[in-house]
Amino acid sequence: MASIFNALNTGYSGLKTSQVAIDTIGHNIANAENPDYTRQRVVIEPNTPLNTTPGDIGLGAKITEIVRIHDEFVYKRLKSSSSDSEYANFRQSTLDEVSTYFPEIDKNGIYDSLAKYFDAWNSFSTNSDDSALKIDLAQQSKSLAVAIKDTRQLLQDTQDSLDEQLKTSIDEINRLGKEIAELNVRIDTHEAGGDNANDLRDQRDKLELALSKLVNIEVSKGELKSDMSVDPNYVESTDQYHLSIGGSSFVDGSTFHPLVLENAGDGTPYSNVYYQRQDYVKFDITNYLQGGKVGAILSLRGSDYSEEYGKFMNGDIQGIIDKLDSFASALITNTNNIYASHATDSMFSNVSVDSNMLISNSTLPIDTAQQFKVKVYDSNGAVVAERSIGLEGTFQDVVDDINRSDIDDNGDNTITNDVDDFVSASIDPQGNFSISLKAGMEDQGYRFSIEEVDPQNPSLFAGALGLERFFDGTNAEDIDLNRYLDENPTRIGGNGAPIAGDNSVANAMVQLQYDKIDFYIAGSQEPYSSDTLSGFFRMSTTEVAEKTAAAHTTAETSQSLLNAVVNEFDSISRVDIDEELTNLMKYQTGYSASAKVITTIDQMIETLLGIKQ
């Protein structure tokens, strides 16, 4: 039965709903500048009416819930676009820095040093006995070596920095994951009574978005619910929460599984990322991490570490290092191979070999289909003995062939003037290969050299082993002018035969800049490329420039896509001050009207009481 007090309660319900709506609007306005806040709306429904005759009598309004206007589908695209944009921007900034390590357009850097190095050989070839030219050649050689080493060190520093940033990022990922798990507990507790934990969900979304900028994540939140009567863009999730990284469960409700870092291999400072289960069993997920800053770090630094080769087998920075090492190694090997034709009294390798290993099975860039020859000179520069050595067997076979006494090198039926009578070869227990004049031969003025049987198709045996070195080292990390020559540059020889006026070695060095040679990447027995030294270096620097340009294009594209998604998301979930002020006026009017209803009913009650008196 309807009563005047029901009417009073109806007016009160209007006051109450308007008050809560105004409070919600005030909350929206207060957070209008908060980029992580989602606007909220009250859902108002009528109270259950009184069933009377002749019809139902309404009992006012009630607020059933306060919802945030959130579209989970758009938010998922926002996370994905943020991850892609962060990935692209990080790669761009890193490659921009790397490209500055190759300032070739400024007549500076390795390419310019290489040109000056060959210019010095060209000058030296005109008079290989000129000490001033030897000193200049030594200086240009050291400058080239320094330029190569410095660039290599800058790349190494970048790779080291990426590894440090990986560690920092993994710590940040774990912090965010732990906070998300803790928030899930609070959300479950808050929503157990039927209320919506809107602000807590905003906090969790903020953490998810920050996490997506670090690495690509997959989030499942149970079933989605939509209510067109509230807002066409309202698509919210239930709270069966699960977040995975790299295919592994990272946050499961209130349970958090941390990521841990361990050395990528023995003797390396670099780290791989492992997923740790609750029973502390770990799985390497490095190659499964994609997107975001971490994905960019791994794509640049490398993610597949080889203990056999002591380096990453992938990664953009590693690829640039590999090509610079390949360039330096080819320069060292081919230069030393030519320099081995400079007559001397002894040669010692700077790499160790397994005496019983087939040469074809070694990782050294030796063409076993070719041959080299040992030549012995007398004090007048005349060749007194010469022997060709095949490379189809083991390293010990090479030693044995040099030392064989049953070969008549000169075909004169004399057993005292063959190569084995002047020199002997050996491999010590440490695997060091050596060839030296026999006792007394040096005092008699004899010298020997190693030359290619076919200079157009060199075996590179002497250069690969570093038997007679113009350059020390094996790659871009340790290339340097041979210490013996650096101590006294006048020891540099441009002659083949040990006589004045022979410039054959210097001339061959000049020709080297025009010859196509093979370039090998560590970890592969097949040549990566066949080119001139300058051609290979230009190709390598062009690849750096192309990678940088591609990174710029990708970053611009991903940023445009992100901007579009952000605009879409903002149009749905961000606070619009004009809209809020309009609603404020609406609910303020409603509040005033409800107050008027209560005032009117109050006057009615006074009238009734007055009648009774």
Image (cartoon, grey):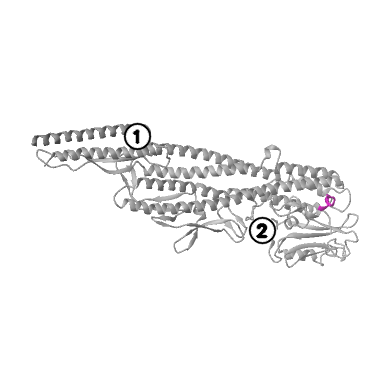
Q: Residues within 10 Å of mark 1 (few under 14, many from 20)?
A: some
Between 323 and 608, which is closer to the camera in this rendering? Answer: 608
Quadrant showing the C terminus: top left
Between 133 and 537, which is closer to the camera in this rendering? Answer: 133
For mark 2, what is the residue? 363
* Residue 282 drawn above or below residue 584: below
- Indicate the position of residue 310 as horizontal and vertical percent values: 62, 58
Q: Residue at x 49, y 50 (%)?
A: 290
Q: Is residue 492 magenta?
A: yes
SS for dot 2: loop
1 or 2: tag closer to the N-terminus: 2
- Distance, label 1 to label 2, CA atoms, is 73 Å
Callout 2, which amino acid? Thr
Quadrant showing the N terminus: top left
- Indicate the position of residue 340 as horizontal and vertical percent values: 79, 55
Q: Residues within 10 Å of mark 2 (few under 14, many from 20)?
A: some
- Indicate the position of residue 203 as horizontal and vertical percent values: 41, 47
Give the residue furthest to the front. 613
- The range drawn in magenta is 487-494
Between 485 and 607, which is closer to the camera in this rendering? Answer: 607
Q: Is residue 488 magenta?
A: yes
**Disc assigned to residue 580:** 1
Q: Residue at x 32, y 39 (%)?
A: 23
Q: Residue at x 45, y 50 (%)?
A: 217
Q: Is residue 483 visible?
A: yes
- Indicate the position of residue 316 as horizontal and vertical percent values: 58, 48
Mark whose residue sits in front, 1 or 2 = 1
**Disc assigned to residue 38:** none
